[in-house]
Image (spheres, rainbow, N blue to C red):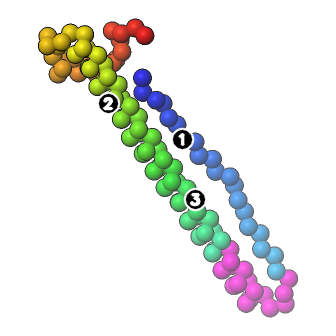
Amino acid sequence: MAARNTVHMERAPSGLVVKRSDADESADSKVAENAIVAAQLESDRLEALEREQCLHTRESLIKADLRGQRATKRLVSDMMMETHGACYDRGFASHLLTRNPLRNFSV
């Protein structure tokens, strides 16, 4: 039976508040604006890295699931060869196993 793996990602809201009370408003407002833009860019970069990591994790889980499905097919096929010997057609059995690999077996 193939494993069912899931990936869960949460987004937490974040915010940045900058307050300045200096007399020179124009220079300070530009510095504050640059700080806000830099903080937002860094936040976006971190979110993109997190999404990329989640995609890599999901891809790894899918590959592992496919390896498990192939291993199950090989196991069932080998069991059929042991049971039925030379009369067993591996290609035909592979076709039968595509829908439900363990339907004819009881554990």
- Can you tell which of label 2 and label 1 is closer to the viewer? 2
Secondary structure type for disc 1? loop
| Three-letter amino acid code of the residue under disc 1 | Val
Distance Cα–Cα, label 2 vs label 1: 22 Å
- Horizontal and vertical percent position of residue 10: 63, 47
Secondary structure of the residue carrying numbered label 2: helix
Label drawn at residue 84: none
Residue at the (73%, 90%) spot, across then down: 27
> Is residue 95 at all visible to an observer of this figure?
no
Determine if the magenta segment contains residue 23. Answer: yes
Residue range corresponding to the magenta coloring:
21-36
Q: Residue drawn at (46%, 29%), measured in percent from left and top?
A: 3
Which dot marks residue 7? 1
Instruction: From the image, give the main secondary structure of the stretch colored magenta.
Output: helix
Q: Kindly tell me whether residue 21 is visible in this rendering.
A: yes
The CA span between labels 3 and 1 is 16 Å
Mark 3, secondary structure of its residue:
helix
State the image quarter where residue 85 is shown. top left
Q: Which mark is residue 47?
A: 3
**Residue under label 2:** 70
| Placement of 4 over or under 61, stated as above or below | above
Q: CA distance from mark 2 to mark 3?
A: 35 Å
Is residue 58 positioned above or below 50 on the image? above
Would you call the spot at circle 2 few (<14 residues within 10 Å), some (14-19), or many (20 or more)? few
Q: Nearer the viewer, mark 3 or mark 1?
A: 1
Identify residue type, mark 3.
Glu
Q: Crowding near pointer 3: few (<14 within 10 Å), some, many (20+)?
A: few
What is the quadrant of the C terminus in the image? top left
Q: Quadrant of the N terminus?
A: top left
Q: Is residue 49 above or below residue 35?
A: above
Q: Earlier in the sequence, mark 2 or mark 3?
A: 3
